[in-house]
Structures are given as C-alpha cells and as structure tokens.
Image (cartoon, helix red, strand yellow):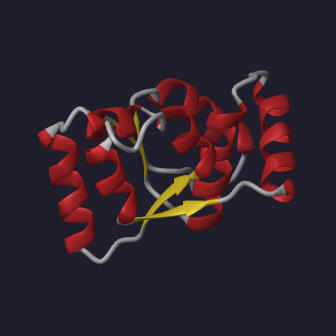
Amino acid sequence: MGVLLAIEANDRRMWAIHHLALEDGRRLIVPAVVVAQAWRDARRQVQLGRFLRSCEEVAIGPEVGRAAGALCGKAGTRDVVDACVIVVALARGAIVFTSDRGDLTHLAEASGIKPGLVIRQV
C-alpha cells in the first residue's frame, strides 16, 4: 500500500519508477485488496486514479485467497493482504515495490519458491 500512498502524495520518485516501467513495456499489477486499503474518494484521489488506470487490478478469488491463507500459516503471520501480494507476484514473476519490505520478504521466503522474488523498498 505504501506505493499507492506515495503515488497519491504525488511522490516524484514513484512517478519516475512508474514511467520507466511503462517505457520498458512492463505490466503494472496491483491486487484489488491493496487498492481497497488505499482507495477512499475518487474526487480527492486524482493521482491515485490516474496511476491505477495504467495498472492491471487483479481480483482475489478463492484460489489466491486460500493460497494466501496457507502462506500466512507457513509464515506465522496474519496479514492476508501482504500474503495476497506475494501469491500474485509469485504467480506472475513480478517485481514487488513496497514500503514494508521486511514483512513481504518474510512471506516470500516462507513460500519456499525459488528463485525468490525481487522486492524493492520505496
């Protein structure tokens, strides 16, 4: 969610990363549950809305939900939103940008999937 909050605050570094990713032809993926954590009012969140238009919002269905729950069990954590981020990223081979690198790294390692995810701090 830290990325979305940075975008909402019009953080120049995040917009630069966004621009470079699009320029490089990368797909930007955001699990819908992460959007739910940040989204409050379209009239006030113009920057966030603009950013999300360039992203693929991934719905979290039963398969991802169960995988995220199981991952929380393996990792000994309770944050299913973070676990959903990891499950979606692992399934798509995505690079994860986060303000919470420690928790996401712990979840990624608990998955046991190799090679591990690339997780970048924002």
Q: Residue at x 76, y 23 (%)?
A: 78
The correct choice, above or below, for 5 with respect to 20 in the image is above
Residue 17 position, x and y percent, is 22, 53
Instruction: Examine the image and state in which quarter residue 70 appears.
Output: top right
Instruction: Examine the image and state in which quarter residue 72 appears.
Output: top right
The correct choice, above or below, for 110 with respect to 31 in the image is above
Residue 104 position, x and y percent, is 56, 34
Residue 18 or residue 57, whichever sits in front: 57
The correct choice, above or below, for 73 with respect to 49 in the image is above
The correct choice, above or below, for 6 with respect to 86 in the image is above
Asked if residue 84 lies left or right of residue 2, the reply is right
Residue 56 or residue 87, whichever sits in front: 56
Asked if residue 10 lies left or right of residue 27, the reply is left
- Say how many tags the image has: 0
Q: Residue at x 87, y 47 (%)?
A: 66
Q: Quadrant of the C terminus?
A: top left
Asked if residue 66 lies left or right of residue 53, the reply is right
User: Does any portion of residue 114 appear in the rendered image?
Assistant: no
Residue 76 position, x and y percent, is 79, 22
User: Does any portion of residue 82 appear in the rendered image?
Assistant: yes
Residue 26 or residue 1, whichever sits in front: 1
Asked if residue 102 lies left or right of residue 12, the reply is right
Residue 19 position, x and y percent, is 19, 61
Q: Residue at x 31, y 36 (%)?
A: 44
Q: Residue at x 83, y 38 (%)?
A: 69
